[in-house]
Image: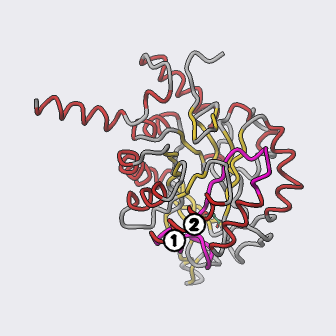
Amino acid sequence: MNKVDHSFTIGNVKFNNTVLTASGTYGFGLEFAKIIDVSRLGGIATKGLSLEPKKGNPGERIYETPAGMLNSIGLENPGVDSFKKDYLPEAAKLGTKIIANISGSSLEEYGLMAESLESEKDVAALEVNISCPNVKAGGMAFGTDLKMVEKVTEIVKKNTTKPVIIKLSPNVTNIVDFAQAAQYSGADAVSLINTLMGMAIDINKRKPVLGNVMGGLSGPAVKPVALRMVYQVSQKAKIPVIGMGGISNPRDAIEFLLAGANAIMLGTINFREPQMPLDIIEGIEKYCLDNGFNSVQDLVGLAWKEEKHVKTNRCT
Ligand code: SIN
């Protein structure tokens, strides 16, 4: 029995832990379940699903960078029907919440994906990917256009009763505007950040390394950018914020909570240290106990709430 309450809620769904794993870094949880007790996680966001199966991009798709990783996978996945038939029944037995991450190449496809998953009782929530930098249609093209963010959110909400989490792109001038567009269009939560666009060049071949030329940068290198965006968004958002971007240890996770994230997702670190999500859960628990907090939610936003409090005191 935990001495600290680790739960948080999105819409009408209660998650038992604030530590979840990020889409695209955890498959459907089945391989990781052989290594760690995934039932202790708050949830698993699946690999991005599309209406039809996708082979992904050709050529090199992963490249290690100092303190990070570039990927240009291109949403390789078995498609939503195969997910429901071949993966979801097993994933549902893992004892944690399954969040289906969905991608569409048109507005209509987002609606159809939501509709297709509506009757799946083992899908706790939908995370809507409007921020993949590696596909030509949909993805980041939608997530960097305020009108499209509204339209995608609206069509998904129209086709589901499950909580809808909109996954935001950092490749915009002001991410707060995009979070607010999602919120005003009915999103139940936002998650941020997806990867930052980057590239690498092979100096011997004198060509870009990645087959798709550009890819998404993740890992510790992006953490300060992600933390800053969570800090900005959470001060304006009236819906829960899920923070992610380079979180690699308990200290990073606590920083995101203090910045205003109600929950966090772990991504790139899963490839290097698959037990880290559990170490982070324990680290958060210890921090709460050491500092007299009974609930992880009590930490949320203290970095700016305290600041506002101090400023108010100074003025009066
Ligand atoms: C990919 O499959 O290309 C990555 C997915 C994403 O960045 O949203």
The structure residue drawn at horizontal position 80% and vertical position 65%, both measured from the top left corner, is 79
- Residue 210 x %, y %: 62, 75
- Ligand 1 in which quarter: bottom right
The structure residue drawn at horizontal position 76% and vertical position 56%, both measured from the top left corner, is 117
- Looking at the image, which residue sits at the far left? 316
Task: Pick the quarter of the image with the C terminus.
Answer: top left
**Quick check: is 163 in the magenta stretch?**
no
Colour scheme shown? secondary structure
- Pointer 1 local density, CA inside 10 Å: few below 14, some 14–19, many at least 20: some
- Looking at the image, which residue sits at the far bottom? 206
- Residue 58 x %, y %: 72, 77
Label 2: which residue? 152
The answer to whether the residue labelled 2 contacts the one labelled 1, judged by CB atoms less than 8 Å apart, is: yes
Label 1: which residue? 148
Residue 20 found in image quarter? top right
Residue 313 found in image quarter? top left
Which of the numbered marks, if any, corresponds to residue 263?
none
Residue 92 higher or lower than 117, as above or below: above
Start and end of the magenta stretch? Answer: 117-145
- Residue 278 x %, y %: 64, 32
Residue 175 higher or lower than 6, as above or below: below
The structure residue drawn at horizontal position 44% and vertical position 27%, both measured from the top left corner, is 298
- Secondary structure of the residue carrying tag 2 is helix
Query: Nearest the camera: 258 or 145?
Result: 145
Residue 265 higher or lower than 278, as above or below: below
